[in-house]
Image: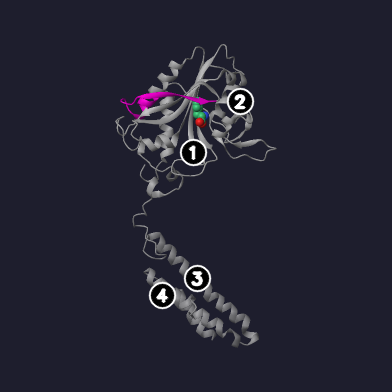
Amino acid sequence: MLEKIDSLISEVEIFNADTAEQLEEFRLRFLSKKGHLAAIFAEMKQVLPEDRKSFGQKVNELKNKAEEKIKFFSEKFEFKGDETIHGLDLSLPGEPIQLGSRHPVSIVRNDIVEIFNRLGYVVAEGPEIEDDWHNFTALNFPPEHPARDMQDTFFMDDAIGMALRTHTSSVQVRVMQTTKPPIRIIAPGRVYRNEAISARAHCLFHQVEGLYIDENVSFADLKQTLLYFVKEMFGEKSTIRLRPSYFPFTEPSAEMDVSCNICEGKGCNVCKYTGWLEIMGCGMVDPNVLENCGIDSKKYSGFAFGMGIERIAMMKYTIKDLRLYYENDERFLEQF
Ligand code: PHE
């Protein structure tokens, strides 16, 4: 038995592999379940107790030498890029890495931000979990006021008095509290509403709201700013229309429609044959709101506006269902 092991040891010592196949064959012959070492281990029981020690040493020597050979040659083959030690061929071209693309909401948000940047607006941000005062009370929605029904949201425990913000107007409040006019900001961000999910409504969406406060800011400034935005966003031919509306924090308030960019105002199924699409709310900041935030309403006036990014992206790319934005379906996302 010992002689057999000795002869196997010399066989290992003189072994030389030219190819990976030869090395693999060697490995199978010595180290696999059906190889020499397994067979020797199986015979171990029959060895006399007094011989076991020397026998064990020989077996270990054989095992270590066989493993060293394998290690040596595998490194050599791997280094040369020879094929298939581990099925790896370093000379082959790599797997293609797919490039991702920006989400349509991000693309349109960046477009909007860029346009307002050119007019001197800077981006402001605030928390998504907001207290009642910043989201509602400071903006003239006192508790129990029916206007709160327009923006139902997800409330935390009553004792904490926090809720998911329903609009980024709360960011405007934060900026007015801490900054002296003139103020020119836009607040992009995610907002939440307690709404049933459908093709046209979701419990979360994204907004860009804007605020301009200075001395002698008038409704004419508001109108011209928004007209400029629309022409930059949808093209020179686009026009706007303002309709009287109501928001607790602006007076007067308006809804702004833009001429349908698909039919150029002639009427189609996207604009429901009206030639107009509603894209934002706007108005002159209510003096109460300015005072709530520590701004002298006798000296300063301002305007505010807010729009949903998803809605603008829907127009830009003719997307028909709001739910597509949040489903992470690559077939949808890779189109942008
Ligand atoms: N905050 C309003 C909303 O989310 C939008 C708005 C902003 C309207 C500013 C007027 C002025 O519906």
Q: Quadrant of residue 111?
A: top left
Q: Kindly identify which residue carries mark 3.
A: 67
Q: CA distance from mark 3 to mark 4?
A: 13 Å
Quarter of the image containing the C terminus? top left
Dot 1 or dot 4: first in sequence order is: 4
Q: How many marks?
A: 4
Q: Is residue 224 magenta?
A: no
Disc 3, disc 2: CB below 8 Å?
A: no
Ligand 1 closer than 8 Å to label 1 CB? no
Label 2 packing within 10 angstroms: few (<14), some (14-19), many (20+): many
Q: Position of residue 175 (x, y in %)?
A: 57, 24
Earlier sequence position, callout 2 versus callout 4: 4
Height in image: 7 above or below 173?
below
In the image, which residues are magenta?
Answer: 229-247
Label 4, on which residue?
25
Callout 2 amino acid: Ala
Observer-nearest of 307 and 119: 307
User: Could you tell me the amino acid type at mark 4?
Assistant: Glu
Q: Point out the tag, 3 or 4, that comes first from the N-terminus.
A: 4
Instruction: Give the spatial CA distance, label 1 vs label 3.
Output: 61 Å
Whether residue 249 appears in this view of the structure is yes
Does residue 212 appear anywhere in the picture? no
Q: Amino acid at mark 1?
A: Phe
Q: Quadrant of residue 48?
A: bottom right
Tell me where residue 127 appears, x and y as whole percent: 58, 34
Q: Which residue is mark 1?
A: 205
Indicate the amino acid at tag 3.
Glu
- Report whether the residue tagged 2 is closer than 8 Å to ligand 1: no
For discs 3 and 4, the disc positioned in front in the rendered view: 4
* Residue at x 42% of width, y 49% of height: 329
Q: CA distance from mark 3 to mark 2?
A: 76 Å
Q: Which residue is mark 2?
A: 138
